[in-house]
Image (spheres, coloured by chain):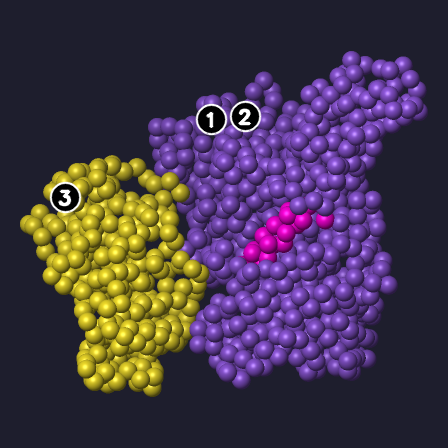
């Protein structure tokens, strides 16, 4: 379990990093926290000619909120997000989800940009990004562009990121008053990748009916998915127990999980329904209690 | 000073916890090369051609050793223990010779400047395989026309035997009720924190081998024999070892390849197994399938028990039938069974060989009989605790002759109060209270289950173990033994025994274990044997040392030995005059021509039967199948407890491993013999977060066989949890649990009425 030989570069500007990535033309890997890449290297499953270490580039480690958007620099550690008062205030769903990532040792090293770019369909951050309709900030030779979750996540461990592009930040919209969100997941052990994870966000109108709702699930497909059928069903309805149960059942029917060593597809469907029900109930309660900015 | 029975913190911990341990990887070996093993990618294939040329051409590569290079060292290693039922026994050799039989079997050994280069070289060796059909499960191995793992083992049968007492068929014919069940328990492995590691240096005709082994003396014998050296030319050292759990008791190919390479190249060589190799190449544990027929009377008393067990050996049988014999012995348990017949068959498959792991068959024997107790309770509508109580051996029946003979000896239990042990566990659990609570919560739709399991733990005390006591001129007492520590705490527990028996301070005693230069003969640490055998070897040697000291002092003081006595860690005149302490006695002995030292090899004094009861309350989430422990109570009786802190640790550790085997850990092979769970992403070890809060109580039924009264404690914690957890889940969901491990997905499927896949 030693990696094959590779060149190592530690650029100090984004431009330099992008230039390096371009020169290796797809044969270089970006390393930040190393929590996913290093095991792949040590198993010799990934054999890039070069590693481009972006840890020394200043200006990629930040958390800031403005204009209804929470923006987090790519090399910001999960632990920083977990402990950030700004995140708790402006994106409680993210604060809740990030605690499920691995163990604290992993969260001390792993980065926001790395988790997004790795695109594990059961990882927490891609699910939150999908639920909140956030965007990935990408810097390439031609400048900066953004991609939504559906534009970014192509399939298992595969994104639309070009070989000479770098994820430089991730943006999560702030939901505002009258909204509520919740994250639920079940893993075999504490700290494992989720068998199924659900992120729910919703807004209630003055009458207490659902103004809008977004449901994203991980671990049930090749990328994080939205449960559009259940979202549509819930719109305009009061989130009482029977309605939420019906929505949860709809979710189980509209996902395409697969069986693996740890759980059957049928079990994942059942779990998706259970966790969706719990997430929706919590999100609705939080919305009724005053909403995101209220309980920050 | 009184030390035995005291809760003394481990003296080795400061060193180990501050990173000053000396594991094989830490041994300073200037100029050492590093090795890497080329392992088979196929579960069954013929090696048509192997080209090491490009690998040898890589800068930094010193050697690529293949089967052809090994000469007379290429032959199967000796089997750990013979058994008359071993009809077709095959053991592994240092490298596969022409045919590979499991994924991970060594094919070549690369030696290079460092491990990185060595692994690069592995990729440059080209092996042309002719893939052959593989049998990767018991069922596949037993199918008609199944491919054979060994041509000399038709039907993939290594052999088998029946062990028992009474006429089981007649007893079954006469029994009022006959019950059946089939049980299955899947593959797992020991997963020591330190993987295997071997280093060797050959200088001036002397070979030194460091290995993370449980059996350094056996390693020395085999290495000497296979490499054509005299035993005195070989010194084997097991330095600090980071966990073994039975799996490091085997003699492994790398333990020959590394010294072979060191001798061939003339430089020290080190090989440290990585975790991926450990998953493939360290011996594993189980599968077993049990077909159980029980004859019972109307009160649930077991009249006859007939068990047929298939045991998946994997590709070789390095341990012979050791785990199978343990299964048979432990199916009897703490119960009176008038007629019993346990038939076991060892089956070869194209999977990693299985051998010993924490209990080495004992947990599965306990699983079989305890699941039978729950079957009886279920079928007769009785309380499972009451069914067990009716079948328990009574304290007045001790020593209890089971009627079962194993080889030349009879299984006779030495002591214990099994009914009191079970009753205490139930009382601590508040069994009656939880039965009421269970009904109350069930009415709310919540699934509470109560599980119970008894066990006995027979220590592996054959044939002997030794201790050498040496007094130094600094006033220290060194205890040497061949039974090294892999984390059990020998440096504390053995020092406690020596210090108490000789009246020394604990700080005066130093334990040096696991070095063949320290003591002439040794067997090793396994099978819950060290406290019994080394403890009593220390006791007898201490008597000898005391007598030697008195004689030494008598010569020094020009008095008769009768005028002297041992007192307070030294020798004094009975009339209260002069006292000589250990340092002075050691110096005087040396002046008189011989060191103050005594060695004793303590031979198996008879069967030691520790016992205990585990009781658990679980709650199963009906919507997710997740099992949560509400209570877990352990009653543990290992005779006289030397150090409760260490005994507690043994129980907790054993429980954690069995929890893994019950709910989390499973080695899954696909049909072609590829391991699908070969990393910690998929092989799930329980962590602290998964452990139940354990309430642990000790009883002390002294063994009558020795004055120390100790029994085995190393495996008891791991024996009953499988059965206890299965019983609790079954009780919660109301569906029979016949196989382990169980994931939430599988529990949910059981609740839906699906058979387990």
Task: Give the structural element (helix, strand or loop) at label 1.
Answer: loop
- Residue underneath mark 1: B32
Q: Which residue is mark 2?
A: B201
Which mark, by number, is residue B610? none
Q: Position of residue B755 (x, y in %)?
A: 52, 76
Q: CA distance from mark 3 to mark 1?
A: 42 Å
Label 2 is found on which chain of the structure?
Answer: B
Residue B60 at x, y percent in the picture: 37, 28
Q: Which chain is purple?
A: B
Q: Secondary structure at mark 2?
A: strand
Question: Do pointers 2 and 3 mark residues of a single chain?
Answer: no
Magenta residue span: B641-660
Q: Are marks 3 and 1 in contact (CB under 8 Å)?
A: no
Q: Is residue B72 visible?
A: no
Determine crowd level at label 1: few under 14, some 14-19, many 20+ residues with C-alpha closer than 10 A: some
Residue B441: name its quadrant: bottom right
Quadrant where the N terminus of chain B lies? top right
Residue drawn at point x = 18 percent, y = 47 percent: A60
Would you say the residues marked 2 and 1 are in contact, meaning their CB atoms lie under 8 Å apart? yes
Vertical position of residue B224 compared to residue A279: above or below: above
Find residue A14 and name its label: 3
* Subunit that carries the residue with mark 1: B
Q: Is residue B11 above or below residue B438?
A: above
């Amino acid at each position: 379990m030693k990696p094959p030989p590779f060149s190592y570069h530690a650029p100090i500007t984004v431009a330099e990093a992008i230039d390096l990535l371009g020169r290796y033309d797809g044969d270089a890997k970006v390393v930040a926290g190393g929590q996913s890449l290093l095991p792949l290297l040590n198993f010799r499953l990934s054999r890039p000619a070069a590693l481009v270490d972006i840890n020394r580039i200043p200006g990629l480690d930040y958390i800031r909120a403005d204009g209804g958007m929470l923006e987090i620099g790519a090399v910001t550690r999960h632990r920083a997000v977990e402990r950030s008062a700004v995140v708790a205030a402006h994106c409680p769903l993210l604060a809740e989800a990030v605690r499920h990532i691995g163990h604290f040792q992993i969260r001390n090293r792993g980065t926001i940009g790395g988790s997004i770019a790795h695109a594990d369909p059961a990882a927490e951050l891609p699910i939150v990004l999908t639920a909140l309709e956030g965007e990935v900030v990408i810097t390439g030779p031609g400048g900066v562009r953004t991609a939504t979750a559906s534009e970014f996540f192509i399939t298992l461990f595969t994104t639309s990121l070009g070989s000479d592009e770098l994820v430089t930040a991730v943006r999560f919209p702030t939901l505002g008053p009258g909204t509520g969100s919740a994250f639920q997941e079940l893993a075999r052990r504490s700290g494992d990748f989720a068998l199924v994870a659900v992120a729910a966000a919703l807004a209630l109108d003055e009458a207490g009916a659902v103004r809008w709702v977004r449901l994203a699930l991980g671990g049930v497909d090749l990328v994080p998915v939205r449960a559009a059928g259940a979202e549509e069903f819930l719109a305009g309805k009061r989130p009482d127990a029977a309605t939420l149960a019906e929505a949860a059942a709809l979710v189980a029917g509209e996902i395409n999980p697969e069986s693996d060593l740890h759980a059957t597809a049928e079990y994942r469907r059942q779990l998706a329904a259970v966790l969706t029900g719990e997430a929706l109930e919590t999100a609705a309660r939080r919305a009724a209690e005053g909403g995101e900015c209220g309980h920050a | 000073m009184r030390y035995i029975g005291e809760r003394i913190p481990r003296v080795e911990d400061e060193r180990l916890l501050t990173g000053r341990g000396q594991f094989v990887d830490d041994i300073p070996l200037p100029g050492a090369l590093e090795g890497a093993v080329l392992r088979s990618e196929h579960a069954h294939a013929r090696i048509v051609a192997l080209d090491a040329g490009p690998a040898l051409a890589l800068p930094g590569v010193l050697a690529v050793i293949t089967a052809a290079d090994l000469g007379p060292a290429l032959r199967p290693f000796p089997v750990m223990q013979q058994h008359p039922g071993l009809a077709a026994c095959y053991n592994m050799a240092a490298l596969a010779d022409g045919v590979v039989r499991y994924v991970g079997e060594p094919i070549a050994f690369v030696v290079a400047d460092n491990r990185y280069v060595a692994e690069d070289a592995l990729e440059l060796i080209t092996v042309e395989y002719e893939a052959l059909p593989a049998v990767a499960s018991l069922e596949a191995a037993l199918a008609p026309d199944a491919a054979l793992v060994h041509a000399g083992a038709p039907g993939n049968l290594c052999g088998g035997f029946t062990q028992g007492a009474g006429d089981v068929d007649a007893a079954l014919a006469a029994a009022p009720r006959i019950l059946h069940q089939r049980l299955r328990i899947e593959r797992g492995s020991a997963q020591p924190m330190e993987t295997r590691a071997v280093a060797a240096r050959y200088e001036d005709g002397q070979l030194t081998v460091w290995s993370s082994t449980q059996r350094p003396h056996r390693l020395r014998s085999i290495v000497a024999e296979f490499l054509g050296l005299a035993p005195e030319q070989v010194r084997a050292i097991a330095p600090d070892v980071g966990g073994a759990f039975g799996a490091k008791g085997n003699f492994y190919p790398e333990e020959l390849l590394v010294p072979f390479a060191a001798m061939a190249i003339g430089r020290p060589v080190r090989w440290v197994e990585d975790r991926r190799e450990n998953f493939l190449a360290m011996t594993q544990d189980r599968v077993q399938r049990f077909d159980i027929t029980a004859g019972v009377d109307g009160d649930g008393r077991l009249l006859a028990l007939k068990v047929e067990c298939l045991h998946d050996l994997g590709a070789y049988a390095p341990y012979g039938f050791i785990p199978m014999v343990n299964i048979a012995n432990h199916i009897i348990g703490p119960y009176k069974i008038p007629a019993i017949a346990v038939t076991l068959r060892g089956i070869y498959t194209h999977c990693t060989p299985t051998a010993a792991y924490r209990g080495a068959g004992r947990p599965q024997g306990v699983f079989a009989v305890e699941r039978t107790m729950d079957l009886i309770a279920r079928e007769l509508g009785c309380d499972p605790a009451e069914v067990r109580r009716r079948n328990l051996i009574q304290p007045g029946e001790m020593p209890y002759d089971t009627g079962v003979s194993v080889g030349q000896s009879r299984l006779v239990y030495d002591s214990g109060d099994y009914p009191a042990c079970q009753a205490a566990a139930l009382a601590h659990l508040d069994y009656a209270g939880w039965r009421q609570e269970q009904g109350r919560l069930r009415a709310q739709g919540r699934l509470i289950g109560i599980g119970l399991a008894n066990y006995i733990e027979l220590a592996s005390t054959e044939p002997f173990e030794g201790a050498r006591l040496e007094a130094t001129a600094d006033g220290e007492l060194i205890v040497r033994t061949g039974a090294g520590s892999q984390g059990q705490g020998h440096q504390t527990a053995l020092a406690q025994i020596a210090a108490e028996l000789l009246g020394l301070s604990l700080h005066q005693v130093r334990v040096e274990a696991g070095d063949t230069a320290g003591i002439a003969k040794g067997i090793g640490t396994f099978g819950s044997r060290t406290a019994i055998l080394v403890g009593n070897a220390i006791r007898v040697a201490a008597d000898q040392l005391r007598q030697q000291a008195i004689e030494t002092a008598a010569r020094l003081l020009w008095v008769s030995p009768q005028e002297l006595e041992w007192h307070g860690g030294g020798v004094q005149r009975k009339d209260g005059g002069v006292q000589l302490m250990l340092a002075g006695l050691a110096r005087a002995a040396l002046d008189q021509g011989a060191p103050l030292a005594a060695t004793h090899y303590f031979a198996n004094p008879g069967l030691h039967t520790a016992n205990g009861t585990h009781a658990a309350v679980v709650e199963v989430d009906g919507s997710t199948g997740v099992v949560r422990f509400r209570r877990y109570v352990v009653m543990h009786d290992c005779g006289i407890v030397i150090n409760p802190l260490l005994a507690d640790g043994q129980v907790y550790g054993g429980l954690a491993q069995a929890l893994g085997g019950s709910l989390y850990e499973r080695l899954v092979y696909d049909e072609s013999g590829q391991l699908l769970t070969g990393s910690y992403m998929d092989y799930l070890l329980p962590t602290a977060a998964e452990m139940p809060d354990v309430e642990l109580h000790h009883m002390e039924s002294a063994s009558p066989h020795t004055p120390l009264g100790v029994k085995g404690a190393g495996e008891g914690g791991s024996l009953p949890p499988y059965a206890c957890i299965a019983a609790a889940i079954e009780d919660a969901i109301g569906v029979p649990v016949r196989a382990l491990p169980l994931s939430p997905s599988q529990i949910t499927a059981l609740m839906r009425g699906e058979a387990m896949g």
